[in-house]
């Protein structure tokens, strides 16, 4: 099974693209656990919450793998949580760092910041999108993992993502 991670800053179309790709490839996608978790808090989130979110995200992904076809699409990954944690608290829990090194995605799709910002109560940094994009790109390069930059409007993003995934499917002869 090929595993695809959609990563990048807030409000860049990660969930939309995840759902589109899952429909296109007739498979399942792993939603962002943080949305439900943060949505149920009646307080500000803490560093401990980010670790709990990481554990929940990994559990969701493990559950989804049993229902996936040739491809599993994940709406987020531990890199998102690492960057979020380091920016918000200046520190990342060891659990996230250890598991980030063990992620086994075949391809990361790094979402560009050229879509309009969509306000959402859980989104925090509309003015730092390029800063975060550059941070994600540096981290992906440092992890030495395969990634593709995805930009343009929604239909262009989808087309670009499909081209990269189809190339991977051909490479793995799936």
Image (tube, helix red, strand yellow):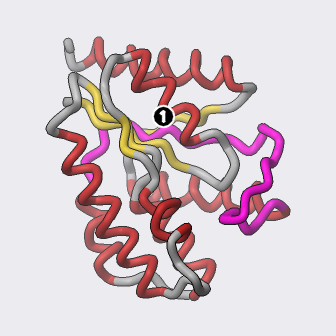
- The quarter of the image holding the C terminus is top left
Task: Answer whether residue 107 is magenta in the image.
Answer: yes
Crowdedness of circle 1 by 10 Å Cα count: few (<14), some, many (20+)?
many
From the top left corner, tell me how far across and down residue 165 is, in percent. Answer: 40, 22
Residue highlighted by disc 1:
18
Task: Answer whether residue 13 is magenta in the image.
Answer: no
The residue drawn where x is 25% and y is 48% is: 104
Is 132 located above or below residue 98 in the figure?
above
- Element type where label 1 sits in the image: helix
Name the one closer to the observer, 172 or 95: 95
Number of marks present in the image shown? 1
The residue drawn where x is 36% and y is 76% is: 52
- Most distant residue in the left direction: 66
From the top left corner, tell me how far across and down residue 107 is, in percent. Answer: 38, 37
Instruction: Magenta stretch: give its range.
Output: 103-126
The residue drawn where x is 33% and y is 21% is: 168
Q: Is residue 19 left or right of residue 28?
A: right
Q: Is residue 72 left or right of residue 109?
A: left
From the top left corner, tell me how far across and down residue 129 is, in percent. Answer: 75, 57
Instruction: Name which quarter of the figure residue 151 lies in.
Output: top right
From the top left corner, tell me how far across and down residue 4 is, in percent. Answer: 37, 36
Is 96 located above or below residue 5 in the figure?
below
């Amino acid at each position: 099974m090929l595993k695809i991670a959609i990563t990048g800053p807030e409000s860049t179309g990660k969930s939309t693209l995840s759902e589109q790709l899952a429909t296109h490839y007739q498979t399942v996608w792993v939603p962002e656990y943080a949305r439900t978790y943060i949505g149920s808090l009646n307080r500000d989130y803490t560093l401990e919450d980010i670790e709990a979110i990481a554990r929940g995200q990994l559990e969701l992904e493990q559950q989804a793998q049993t229902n996936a076809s040739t491809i599993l699409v994940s709406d987020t990954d531990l890199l998102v949580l690492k960057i979020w944690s380091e920016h918000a608290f200046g520190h990342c829990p060891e659990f996230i760092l250890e598991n980030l090194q063990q992620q086994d995605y075949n391809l990361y799709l790094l979402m560009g910041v050229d879509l309009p910002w969509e306000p959402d109560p859980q989104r925090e940094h509309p003015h730092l999108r390029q800063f975060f994009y550059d941070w994600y790109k540096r981290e992906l390069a440092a992890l030495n993992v395969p990634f593709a930059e995805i930009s343009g409007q929604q239909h262009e993003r989808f087309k670009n993502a499909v081209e990269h995934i189809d190339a991977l499917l051909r490479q793995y002869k799936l």
